[in-house]
Image (cartoon, rainbow, N blue to C red):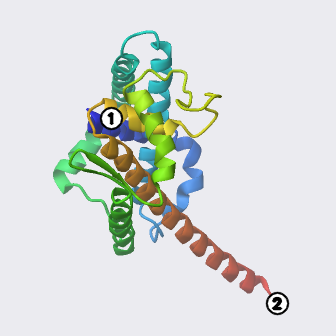
Amino acid sequence: MALLYICLSVCVGAGIILSLKPYWKTGMEFLNRPNRPVSPIFVFLPSAYLIGTLILSWITYFLALAFKNYEKPLFYANTISFVIAVVFLTFLFLSHRERVKRLVYETKKYGISLNIKGTEWFVLISSAVFWTFFICRSLYLDGSYLRVGVSAFSDFGAHLPVIRSFSVGKNFPAQYPHFPDGTMRYHFMFYFMAGNLEFLGLTLPQALNIPSVLSLVSFSMLLYALCVFLRKNSGRRFVLLSVRLP
């Protein structure tokens, strides 16, 4: 169920991006040029993951807050979140039936083509390998023991109880479980997502490591796209300025 939740989040993010296309299309025309510097899918996928997980996690949190007096708030929150996501995606499908049918027809005829360049594959694979090794060596299970990196155990000492307060407890509204002033003012949503993924079936290291790796890989992809875009545009502006000089 946890992996299904992540996939559903990506689909929700993709649906939101496509629904808002008239608003961002003019700002992204550089991706649609014949010699486009970055493949659109290379920007679309990480954007869909980041937007979808953010929105669906907040929906789940507010629903859990509404069911805080029940025995398992996350059960009701996730059930309703799944329904909301499915209804939203169904509405998008019905409102764009012709485009979906054309996409399915083209996929059957030509197959799936990502059209990702060689440098983009390098960024994607290298960042995935690097972040997976780095993250999974910082927190992992060794039998029945939870192993934490030497330089990270002090941080995890504060963060792991927050995750468990969501997955095992009923920390709604969110509060620090071990401080006199329990008000949690910021940066708890990622740990709520990890706690929710643990509630949905992942182990504690998996619930924290998988979204961490996906988020960092998405960041690496978007950072690469931004750097390429700035380099291409700065070079073009330099040429235009040099032509205008007497």
The Cα atoms of the two marked residues, 2 and 1, are separated by 66 Å
The quarter in which the C terminus is drawn is: bottom right
Q: Secondary structure at mark 1?
A: helix
Q: Nearer the viewer, residue 25 or 67?
A: 67
Where is mark 2, residue-wise?
Answer: 246
* Residue at 46% over, 62% down: 220
Would residue 110 be visible to someone looking at this image?
yes
Q: Quadrant of residue 175?
A: top right
Q: Is residue 32 left or right of residue 116?
A: right
Q: Quadrant of the N terminus?
A: top left
* Label 2 element class: loop
Which kind of residue does numbered mark 1 sit on? Glu
Give me the residue at 47% from left, 45% from top: 157
Kindly give the residue lying farthest to the left in the view shown. Answer: 108
Q: Which callout, 2 or 1, points at the residue further toward the start of the chain?
A: 1
Neighbor class of circle 2 (other Cα within 10 Å; few <14, some 14-19, many 20+) is few
Front-most of residues 7 and 246: 7
Q: Amino acid at mark 2?
A: Pro
Residue assigned mark 1: 198
Q: Quadrant of residue 111?
A: bottom left
Q: Is residue 222 above or below residue 184?
A: below
x, y percent for residue 223: 52, 63
Q: As rendered, which of 23 and 70 lies closer to the eye?
A: 70
Where residue 120 appears, x then y in whole percent?
Answer: 38, 69
Between tags 2 and 1, which lies in front?
A: 1
Tally the numbered discs. Answer: 2
Residue 246 is left or right of residue 188, and the answer is: right
Which residue extends farthest top?
69
Residue neighbourhood size for the residue with mark 1, other residues' Cα within 10 Å, grouped as few (<14), some (14–19), many (≥20) = many
Q: What residue appears at the point 46 percent right and 38 percent down from the top-left corner?
A: 191
Quadrant hosting residue 84: top left
Position of 135 relative to 230 (above/below): above
